[in-house]
Amino acid sequence: MTGTRTVPVPSKAPVPRAIGVRVLRDGLLWTVGAALLVLSVAVAVTIGPARISVPDVWSTVAAHLGPGESRLTPIRDGIIWNLRMPRTLLAAVCGAGLAVCGTVMQSLLRNPLADPFVLGVSSGASTGAVAVVVLGAGGGAVSVSAGAFAGALCSFALVLLLSHTLGGTTDRVVLSGVAAMQLFSALTSFVVMTAADAEQTRGVLFWLLGSLSGVGWTDVWVCAAVLAVTLLICLGHARTLDAFAFGQEAAASLGVHVGRTRVVLLCTTALLTAALVSSAGAIGFVGLVLPHAARALTGSGHRRLLPITALAGAVFLVWVDTLARTVLDPQEVPVGVVTALIGVPAFVLVLYRTRRNP
C-alpha cells in the first residue's frame, strides 16, 4: 500500500460556531435596540415645559396599565398619558414603519433611492386631506385621516393600473409612481391655491410637512396594528427579498413567484405608508436613510435587517419629534423639516461611502 496518503477532511466545527456567534450578535443588537427604544420613549416624555421625571412616567404607565393608582396630580397625569405618551409612541411607530417600508422598497425595486413615498402614496394622501379640509369632502362625516387614507389608496391604485398597463416591470412601477406623485401634487396645489383661505393654507402646509401634534391613542393603536401585520408579512418573505437582491430573473430561477410576491409586498407597504401618512403627514428621509444605516450593522439578510431597521427608525423619530417640539418652544417645527435637515447630510454620506465602496 505504498504511495497511499490520507486526504484530510475539512472540519465542519467552525460553521456551527460561526452561526452561534452570529445569533449571539443579532440577539445582542435586538436587546440593545429594544432597551434603547424603551429608554428613549421614557426620557422623551419627560422633555417639555412641565417638569416631569422618568419615575413619574413609569408611575403613570403602571397606573393606567396595571392595578395601581398614579401618585401624580390629574393635570400631570393627563400631560403624560393623554398628550406626550401617545405622541411619542406614534413617533416610534411611524419611524419603525417608514424604515421597514424603505427597506422592502429598496430590495424589491433594487433601487437604493427608493423610499416609502416612491409609489405616490404621500401625494395621494395629501390630496385626500386637502379635499376634506378645504373642499369639505364628506360633509363633515369624514376626518382628515380618513380622507388622507382614501387619497393614498387612490394614488396607489393608479400606480398599479399604470404599471400593469405599461408592462409591470420594476422600472415601470417606479416611473408610474413618479407620474402619480406629480399628478396628485399638482391637484393638491391647485385646490389650495383656488379654494383655501390663509388659515387653511397654513394648516395644510404644516400637515404636509409632517406633524404629530394632536394625535391620540386611536392613531397609535391603528398604526401599531398595521405595522405589526406588515412586519410579520415582510419577515415571512425575508428569504424572497434576499433573492430579489440578485434580480427578478435570478429570483424566478430560485422558485420565487415574482409577480405575485411583488404585488403582495407593494400593497402591504403601501397600506402601511397610507396609514402612517394619514396620521402624521409626510415625513421624509426616514425610509430612505435608515435602511442604509441598518445594513451597515447587520448586512443584507432581511431576517436580521428588518427588526433592526424598525428599532433604529423608531428611536430616530422619537428624538427627532422631541427636537421638533422643543427646539423653538412654544413654536413647533414640522417633523418633516427636521428629518430633512438631518437626512440630507446623512444621505450624502451614504452616497459618498457607496462611491468609495461600490
Image (cartoon, rainbow, N blue to C red):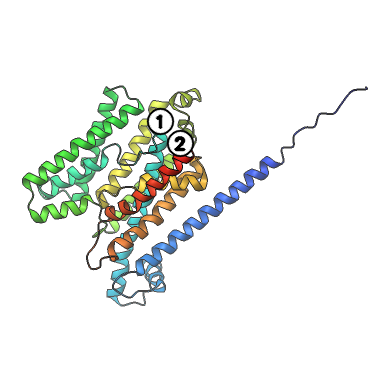
Q: What numbered label is drawn on residue 237?
A: 2
Q: Quadrant of the N terminus?
A: top right
Q: Nearer the viewer, residue 232 or 127?
A: 127
In the picture shown, does residue 86 fall above or below 183?
Answer: below
Whether residue 227 sits left or right of residue 29 in the image: it is: left
Residue underneath mark 1: 261
Residue 341: percent from the left, percent from the top? 31, 53
Whether residue 68 sits left or right of residue 302 in the image: it is: left
Residue 150: percent from the left, percent from the top? 21, 41
For label 2, the SS is: loop
Q: Earlier in the sequence, mark 2 or mark 1?
A: 2
Distance Cα–Cα, label 2 vs label 1: 8 Å
Count of number-bearing discs:
2
Q: Is residue 227 visible?
A: no
- Mark 2, residues whose alpha carbon is within 10 Å: few (<14), some, or many (≥20)? some
Residue 151: name its quadrant.
top left
Residue 322: percent from the left, percent from the top? 33, 62
